[in-house]
């Protein structure tokens, strides 16, 4: 079974010619899986196309510890307890 990590994704998206910053915490096994979740979530919530979401390659995605997470869903949880359908 693959290790599940918590990723902190930082970047911005463009809407109405404005840059709107974004920071999300997502759990996943691979960076491609995490990016897919971010694109889907931001696109769904804010009606933004994928090509208008910018996440820098250097420093845009970081693995964080559960204790560092701001989302209460991820705090104080062991990585083995995560379930991804």
Image (cartoon, rainbow, N blue to C red):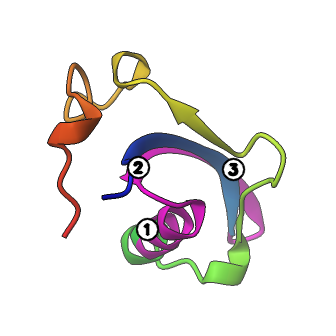
Q: Using the numbered discs, state the Cα–Cα distance from disc 3 to disc 1 in whole angstroms.
A: 14 Å
Boundaries of the magenta span:
15-40
Residue 33 falls within the magenta-colored stretch:
yes
Residue 33: x and y in percent read 48, 68
Residue 53 falls within the magenta-colored stretch:
no
Within 10 angstroms of label 2, few (less than 14), some, or many (20 or more) residues? some
Can the viewer see residue 20 in this picture?
no
Residue 13: x and y in percent read 67, 62
Q: Using the numbered discs, state the Cα–Cα distance from disc 2 to disc 3 in whole angstroms.
A: 14 Å
Q: Nearer the viewer, residue 53 or 4?
A: 4
Give residue 37's mark.
Answer: 1
* Secondary structure beneath label 3: strand
* Secondary structure beneath label 1: helix
* Secondary structure beneath label 2: strand
Say above or below: 81 vs 64: below
Q: Nearer the viewer, mark 3 or mark 1?
A: 1
Q: Nearer the viewer, residue 23 or 21?
A: 23
């Amino acid at each position: 079974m693959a290790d599940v990590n918590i990723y902190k994704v930082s970047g911005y998206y463009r809407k109405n010619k404005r840059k709107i910053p974004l920071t999300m915490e997502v759990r996943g096994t691979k960076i491609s899986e995490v990016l897919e979740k971010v694109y889907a979530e931001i696109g769904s919530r804010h009606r933004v196309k994928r090509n208008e979401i910018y996440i820098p390659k250097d420093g845009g995605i970081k693995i964080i510890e559960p204790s560092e997470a701001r989302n209460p869903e991820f705090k104080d949880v062991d990585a083995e307890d995560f379930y991804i359908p």
